[in-house]
Amino acid sequence: MPDYKELYLTLFDATEKAIRELIAAQQKCEELCLRTPLQEPVLLPFPQEPEEK
């Protein structure tokens, strides 16, 4: 019979590690955005829908 406690703890540890990595990546991106000088926003044209025949 599988050791469910071990399975749970393994999955929990991996989940916690993934969350920490995502938070670190988000913080790094936020820091990069704050250090980048502000620029005028670029407006992209709205895509045109093809006409029906």
Image: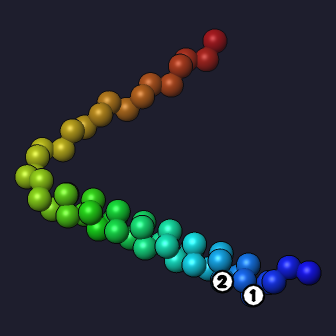
Q: Residue 3: which quarter of the image?
A: bottom right
Q: Position of residue 11 (x, y in %)?
A: 65, 75
Circles 1 and 2, Cβ within 8 Å, touching? The answer is: yes
What colour scheme has been applied to the protein in the rendered image?
rainbow
Q: Which disc is residue 9 wearing? A: 2
The residue that appears at 91% across and 81% down in the rendered structure is 1
Q: Determine whether 44 is above or below 41 in the image.
A: above
Secondary structure under tag 2 reads helix
Q: Amino acid at mark 2?
A: Leu
Which residue in the protein does label 1 denote? Answer: 5
Q: Position of residue 45 (x, y in %)?
A: 32, 30
Q: Amino acid at mark 1?
A: Lys
Q: Crowding at label 2, few (<14), some or many (≥20) Cα neighbours within 10 Å?
A: few
Q: Determine whether 41 is above or below 24 in the image.
A: above
User: Who is closer to the viewer here, 41 or 36?
Assistant: 36
The residue that appears at 63% across and 12% down in the rendered structure is 53
Q: CA distance from mark 1 to mark 2?
A: 6 Å
Looking at this view, name the residue that lies furthest to the right.
1
The residue that appears at 11% across and 46% down in the rendered structure is 39
User: Who is closer to the viewer here, 36 or 10?
Assistant: 10
Q: Determine whether 51 is above or below 1 in the image.
A: above
The residue that appears at 65% across and 77% down in the rendered structure is 10
User: Who is closer to the viewer here, 23 or 9?
Assistant: 9
Looking at this view, name the residue that lies furthest to the bottom.
5
Q: Position of residue 5 (x, y in %)?
A: 75, 87
Secondary structure under tag 1 reads helix
Q: Determine whether 43 is above or below 48 in the image.
A: below
Looking at this view, name the residue that lies furthest to the left.
37
| Left or right: residue 45 compared with residue 34 | right
| Left or right: residue 6 compared with residue 3 | left
Q: Crowding at label 1, few (<14), some or many (≥20) Cα neighbours within 10 Å?
A: few
| Left or right: residue 27 compared with residue 23 | left
